[in-house]
Amino acid sequence: MTKELIKHFDSSRSGLILVLFILLVIVTSVFCKRQSHNDNQIDILADTRTFTISNNTTNFTLRAISVSPNADPISVPPDILGSNDRNQYEVEIPESPYVTIYAPIVYVVQEANVTVGEIKFTLVVRRQEAFIINESSSIPTRIAPYPMGQNLIITRPIRELSVNQNRERNRLQAFSI
């Protein structure tokens, strides 16, 4: 009878070990698949969004005087935006859906090497969206975000006089008095 109990105990112990081994294999395969899925997801999220800033004026040169460290200039040269030219910046997409990255940029506006004002805006990137906010200008220009919110077009109203034209007009008015 003792041999029979020992034999029964050994077979049930072997069965328990076999069941535990099978559970270990199943749990390991489930967690390994989930981990590799997360790795792929991080690779996708560690991407960037590209913003294009276009200077569609005929006589303004824009010089970047303040660029957030969150914005990586990819244009050459990165700090000068001539007439009818464009600059591009890349901003990394945050890994967390609850994080928003802000990248404020300030350009000084020059006409004939004379500073006439500033243009400011902020590049914004959330997990699934990218756009430009807080566009402002201290000179008469039109600043318009365009499709997908990742393009900013700077134009000058046709009716506005240039700095040189204003100076000439003021000079002529002074002589006529």
Image (cartoon, rainbow, N blue to C red):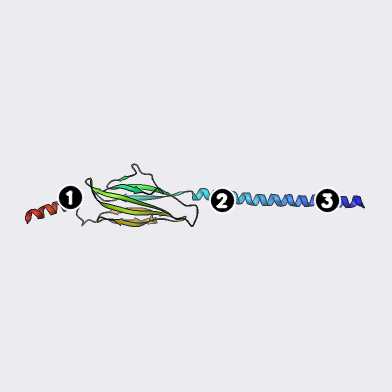
Q: Is 38 placed left or right of 4 in the picture?
A: left
Q: How many marks?
A: 3
Name the foreground residue: 120 vs 87: 120
Q: Would you call the spot at circle 1 few (<14 residues within 10 Å), some (14-19), or many (20 or more)?
A: few
Q: Is 50 placed left or right of 120 in the picture?
A: right
Q: Would you call the spot at circle 2 few (<14 residues within 10 Å), some (14-19), or many (20 or more)?
A: few
First reached walking from the N terminus: tag 1 or tag 3: 3
Q: In this figure, which residue is indicated by the disc labeled 1?
A: 164
First reached walking from the N terminus: tag 1 or tag 2: 2
What is the number of the mark on residue 11? 3
Of the 4 image quadrants, the one containing the C terminus is bottom left
What is the number of the mark on residue 38? 2
First reached walking from the N terminus: tag 2 or tag 3: 3
Q: Marks 2 and 3, how far apart in space?
A: 41 Å
Q: Give amino acid for label 3.
A: Ser
Residue pictured at 36% horizontal, 50% vertical:
52
Residue pictured at 68% horizontal, 51% vertical:
26
Q: Position of residue 13 (x, y in %)?
A: 81, 51
Q: Compared with residue 103, is residue 77 higher up or lower down, i.e. above or below?
A: above
